[in-house]
Image (cartoon, rainbow, N blue to C red):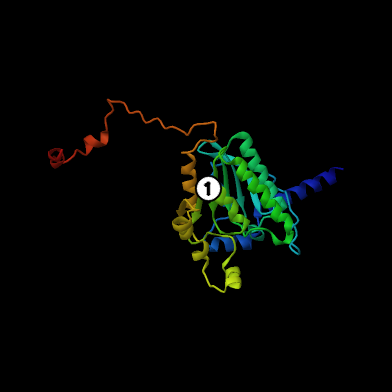
Amino acid sequence: MKLQENDNLATLENMKEAALQGGGTQRIEVQHRKHKLTARERLELLLDPGSFEEFDLLKAGQGARGEGEYPGDGVITGHGTIDGREVCIFSQDFTILGGSLGEAHSGKISKIMDHAVRVGAPIIGLNDSGGARIQEGVDSLAAYGEIFSRNVMASGVVPQISCIMGPCAGGAVYSPAMTDFTFMVDSSSFMFVTGPNVVKTVTHQEISAEDLGGAGVHSTRSGVAHFVLPNDILCLREVRRLINYLPSNHKQRAPILDLRDPVDRTDPAFWSHPCPDWWWISK
């Protein structure tokens, strides 16, 4: 009995290790060569150190034919803090089946969105997904419907923030378009219902991914994107900044910074670097 228990614990640890590795070393290297961070690296930068609590680490979906199952099913979900304030978050992992959404993947996102509404915390989505997982057919399309429904129910209840951090297509951009604030990373993120190859097949028109759904198009013409940043690191930093301006839910007020300044306060820098004579004359 004890031997069997040790075997079970060893198996559990191996599954945890596999989940933490995402799609594996080679795919992580490909992600880095594209100047993109992995899903877990993004979470580490966005949240306060040591604050992240993960949900459903080992939950697996149907998987792709010939590729087996991946613990976590291509998305990391949980809650943590930003400057001490509670947030709920999901981060899609492009190294696992291109971050595509299946039934288990959607179930994890739906669960954390329900939790966000229940506790009154902002929901942040780090999107890096190719859209619906074709191997799961209509199940993946129905799964998107579950997320869209929660987007509507959470609207006006808790802040919803989306970060487009890769080539997102189809259902992967319907949901972010319905959220309150949308960030895009310049040159590496795209939002389109279908990609340039399909457009060429149907309309015989050649168009680049940037012209079809790049950050420039959505920030200057469609209005879908509200913030455009040059890389993942700066994008996540601006999300942290935005959170400090928002209330956690519809029952709270936005944070207020106490800016009252004592009338007798002196500025040492002024006396160490006095203004030139011409400044007084100009006044």
- Element under label 1? helix
Q: Residue furthest front?
A: 203
Compared to residue 210, the image places residue 90 above or below, namely: above
- Please provide percent x and percent y for residue 117: 62, 37
Mark 1 belongs to which amino acid? Answer: Leu
Q: Is residue 17 visible to the viewer in this orientation of the structure?
A: no
Q: Quadrant of the C terminus?
A: top left
Q: Which residue is mark 1?
A: 45
Expressed as whole percent of the image width and height from the top left, the position of residue 193 reads: 59, 60
Q: Is residue 74 left or right of residue 270?
A: right
Q: Residues within 10 Å of mark 1 (few under 14, many from 20)?
A: some
Which residue is located at x 33 percent, y 28 percent?
261
Where does residue 269 sit, x and y in percent of width and height?
Answer: 26, 37
Question: What residue is rendered at 53% in x and 66% in y?
Answer: 209
Name the residue at 50% across, 49% down. Answer: 236
Question: Which quadrant, please, contains the N terminus?
Answer: top right
Q: Is residue 46 left or right of residue 11?
A: left
Residue 176 seen anywhere in this rendered image of the structure: yes
Residue at position x 52%, y 64% in the image: 212
Q: Position of residue 190 (x, y in %)?
A: 53, 60
Q: Please count the marks in the image.
A: 1
